[in-house]
Image: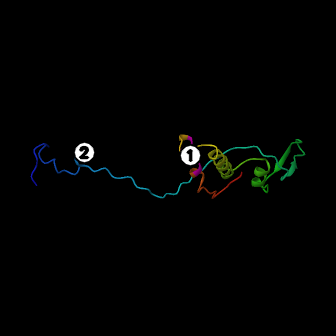
């Protein structure tokens, strides 16, 4: 190859030179995302065994067999999946009152798409 003379000697055909690097095009990749979230809430339940200490008169509770998932739901709390389902319905209703070719319409479409595909794979209550 004959060099043009516009580059430092030996650099014109150097693949590592910034002016010879080709930009890699963007591609789509399917990945799995996992997000662990935690929230402390107060629940009300009668699903426990009352215990009393005769020596000091203190009351406590044996909760080793308490159904915390039921107490959580019965206390009016929402899981993240519940919140996504609610958000999906709000977004759909808002899309009906908004022109689709506006910035708000595009944002609502992205929100609706972001709500899809999530699943709860594990729930823990302590």
Residue beneath label 1, please? 100
Tell me the quarter of the picture where residue 69 sits. bottom right
| Above or below for 100 versus 66 | above
Residue ID at (22%, 51%): 15
Please identify the quadrant where the N terminus is shown: bottom left
In the rendered view, does 36 fall on the left or right side of 82?
Answer: left
Give the total number of marks visible in the rendering. Answer: 2
In the rendered view, does 111 fall on the left or right side of 81?
Answer: left
In the rendered view, does 77 fall on the left or right side of 29?
Answer: right
User: Residue 95: image x %, image y %?
Assistant: 62, 46
User: Residue 10: image x %, image y %?
Assistant: 13, 48
Badge 2 crowding class, 10 Å Cα cut-off, few under 14, some 14 to 19, many 20 or more, is: few
What's the mark number on residue 18?
A: 2
Question: Observer-nearest residue: 56 or 45?
Answer: 45
* Magenta stretch in the rendered image: 104-112
Residue ID at (58%, 45%): 108
């Amino acid at each position: 190859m004959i060099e043009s003379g516009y580059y430092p000697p030996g650099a014109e055909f150097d693949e590592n030179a910034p002016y010879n690097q080709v930009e890699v095009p963007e591609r789509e990749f399917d990945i799995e995302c996992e997000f662990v979230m935690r929230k402390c809430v107060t629940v009300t339940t009668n699903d426990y065994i009352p215990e009393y200490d005769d020596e000091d008169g203190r009351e406590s509770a044996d909760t080793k067999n308490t159904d915390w998932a039921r107490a959580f739901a019965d206390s009016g709390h929402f899981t993240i999946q519940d919140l996504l389902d609610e958000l999906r319905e709000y977004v759909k209703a808002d899309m009906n009152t908004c022109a689709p070719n506006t910035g708000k319409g595009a944002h609502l479409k992205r929100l609706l798409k972001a709500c899809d595909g999530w699943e709860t794979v594990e729930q823990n209550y302590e």
